[in-house]
Structures are given as structure tokens and as C-alpha cells.
Image (spheres, rainbow, N blue to C red):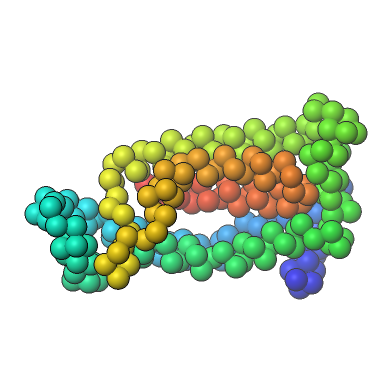
Amino acid sequence: MSVFATLVEHLADLLQPLLGASAAAGAIILFTALVRLLVHPLSRAAARGQKARTELQPKIAELRKKHAKHPEKLQKAVLALHAEEKVSPLSGCLPSLCQMPAFFLLYHLFSNTNNQLLTHQLFAAPLGDHWADALATGGMFGGAGLVYVGLFALVATVAVFNYRRTKRMMAANQAVPAVADGQPVPGMGAMTKVMPFMSFFTLFTVAVVPLAAALYVVTSTTWSAVERAFLYR
């Protein structure tokens, strides 16, 4: 953890002449973007896997008609099709899961109260403070409050974009539920219903975590939206 903190501090020193007191905030945003760039190959692998599964949908639709009254035969036929086409039923998920440790590591770094970065500010908002602190000191439209207003506006815009895009993809793909060993993955149906709304949860996250962690979350979420729009266009 200290290695990452040191790297961010060095970035802050480099940005100091350009950003002044907000150099640490700029360093958090830049470091997050660099990490996302490093794991981009995994995102591309996830996109290739998802596209491969999507291309199988017409054949899976035919199998559904053929085995409409025999669910067990349908599951076996779908698994056989994936094996024949050399496409894993979870090929679009595994690369994404491999990225999670890096994201949790960065979140812990920017929410750690012992981190010296949290003693810096973004304009009038201390990186170690929360939204509640901004409301208590200057209100919604105080110096620190306006920083959060900007973050909430950005997160809401990204969330709406993700919601509309996810709904379109789900309607177009009519994705077959993921299966493993011939059985549906538990909870996948519920996850499909919740997925379009997940981006809105970021609003709650930004409201309750330190500003440094909120900057990381907002940067990573925005990167994901742009990246997915490019990879799944």
C-alpha cells in the first residue's frame, strides 16, 4: 500500500506547478486512469467473450424452440454448443472479476485515514472529509459543497448513460441465462434485473466515503462507461 501511496505523492509533486493546492486530487485522478489503462487488456478480453456469447444467441434460440418442453436437454445442448464453439458461458465475466483486486486495493488506499494524501484539498474540499462535513461547514452551495455537487452531477450523468445503454443491450441480446455444469448460475436472473440500476449506487458511495476515495470511484466509473461504450459499440 505504501508503494502506491508514494507513487501518487510523486505524481502530486509533478502536478504541483500546474494544479497548485489541488495537485493531490489531480494525482488521484491520473493514477486511477493509469491503473485502468493497465488493466484495459482484461476489459478487452471480457468484451471479446461477451461478443462471442452474443454471436451464439441465434443458435441458442433454435435450441430453445427444439427443446422447449425439455429443460434438461436444453441445458445440455447449450453447454455442448459452447464447447463446440469454444466459448465459455462465463467468458465475459471472468476477466472482469480478475480486475477486482486492483480496484479494491486502490479504494482502500484512498479511504485509509492514515494516508497523507487526505490532508490535501480539491479546491475548498479536504480530501479526507465526507459530504456530511461539507454540508456542516458551508452547506450544499458552500465551497466544499459545490465540489460534491459537481461530482454528483457527473455520476448522475454517467449513471443515466449506463442505464440506457444496459437496457438497450439487454433488449437487443435477449441473453440466455449463464449456466455451469448444466445448471443455471444461482441469482443470475435477479442480477440481470438489478444490473441497469447499479451505476446509481455510485451516488451513495460518493456521499459516504472520503473525498479522495470518491474521486477514485468517480474516475473509475466514468472510465468504465467510456471504455464499455467503445468496446461494445
Left or right: residue 157 versus residue 135 is left
Residue 90 picture location, percent across and down = 36, 64
Q: Can residue 104 be seen in this view?
A: yes
Query: How many numbered markers are drawn?
Result: 0
Residue at figure coordinates x 76%, y 57% from the top left: 111
Vertical placement of 7 versus 32: above or below?
below
Residue 109 picture location, percent across and down = 74, 63
Question: Which corner quadrant holds the N terminus?
Answer: bottom right
Question: Which residue is more in the foreground, 151 or 31?
Answer: 151
Residue 183 falls in image quadrant: bottom left
Residue at figure coordinates x 80%, y 44% from the top left: 130
Residue at figure coordinates x 28%, y 45% from the top left: 174
Residue 118 falls in image quadrant: bottom right
Q: Can residue 122 be seen in this view?
A: no
Residue at figure coordinates x 22%, y 71% from the top left: 83
Vertical placement of 139 versus 180: above or below?
above
Left or right: residue 52 versus residue 72 is right
Question: Which residue is more in the foreground, 118 or 179?
Answer: 179
Q: Which residue lies furthest to the left in this view?
A: 66
Residue 135 falls in image quadrant: top right
Left or right: residue 171 versus residue 62 is right
Vertical placement of 56 versus 133: above or below?
below
Residue 209 picture location, percent across and down = 74, 48
